[in-house]
Image: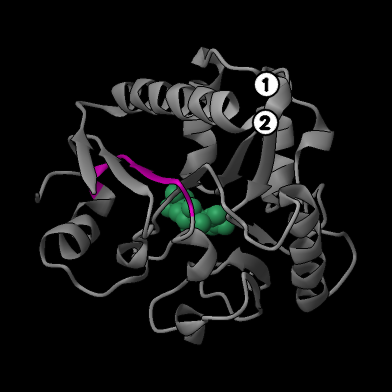
Amino acid sequence: MTTIKVNDEQELINKLASYIEKISNDSIYNRGKFYVGLSGGSVVKYLKESLPKVDTEWSEWVLAFCDERVVPEDNEDSTFGTYKKELLPNIPLKESQFVTIKQGVTAKEAADDYTAKLTKAFGGDDFKFDLLLLGMGPDGHTCSLFPGHPLLEEKDLKVAFITDSPKPPPERITLTYPTINNARNCIFAISGSGKADMIKRILKDKEDLPAGRVKPGAGALYWILDEGAATHL
Ligand SMILES: O=C(O)[C@H](O)[C@@H](O)[C@H](O)[C@H](O)COP(=O)(O)O
């Protein structure tokens, strides 16, 4: 694991851009495509600023979601809807490059359909993301994997559904640890002192919390933190 400390949110955005540029270009050079998993929450805000700085072959990107809320795409809670609004106008990516959840179905059906779409996108059921861009909530959750939730122990499913998320909206689909920890690279990008205590509990005190369980077996893990987020390290 590598912890990268930067001064402020602007530096975090620049650092994120340089990692994304390197990892996407390495992936495209070696395997022809770049498979990236996106998160919601503040990650959207960072990527909106970071991605326009990235020099890459956009047409080779395949974008999916680390988790997604089971709501209509035009609902303000939809992570894809937010990326569509915030990102697509500024980046030469097409909507068809995104693996999105099916509309108008239950959370379970959305998870099953998303699993089938990922199987197609990866050409098999070994979902090996080149990069997962992760956020961490103030309770230590990541993706839609929440403290104390039975999904933390999921070993078989690659994608799961949840109908009792403590962070609204309650219905979501999420990658599980077997998929997350199969990634080639995982990056947490976190800014602000509001999350400093949780970051200390996970990175220094090694408390068993969902974000701390992200340990890609054969991959690299980066925590990019600004001064506020790293206050207690
Ligand atoms: O659906 C979501 O809520 C996000 O995808 C989630 O995984 C996010 O990354 C964390 O909740 C952190 O969110 P914040 O950065 O807004 O705290």
Q: Amino acid at mark 2?
A: Trp
Q: Residues within 10 Å of mark 1 (few under 14, many from 20)?
A: some
Disc number for residue 58: 1
* Residue 85 sits above or below residue 104 on the image: above
Residue 117: quadrant of the picture: bottom right
Graded by Cα atoms within 10 Å as few (under 14), some (14 to 19) or many (20 or more), the crowding at tag 2 reads many
* Magenta range: 183-193
Does residue 139 appear in the picture of this structure?
A: no
Question: Secondary structure under badge 2?
Answer: strand
x 39%, y 84%: residue: 148
Q: Is residue 187 above or below residue 72?
A: above
The residue at 45%/49% (across/down) is 134
Q: Position of residue 199 (x, y in %)?
A: 22, 56
Q: Are marks 2 and 1 in contact (CB under 8 Å)?
A: yes
**Rendering colour mode:** one colour
Residue 26 part of the magenta segment: no
Residue beneath the point at 57% across and 52% down: 128
> Could you tell me how far apart the alpha carbons at marks 2 and 1 are, in whole angstroms?
6 Å
Residue at 55% across, 29% down: 30
Disc 2 designates what residue? Answer: 61
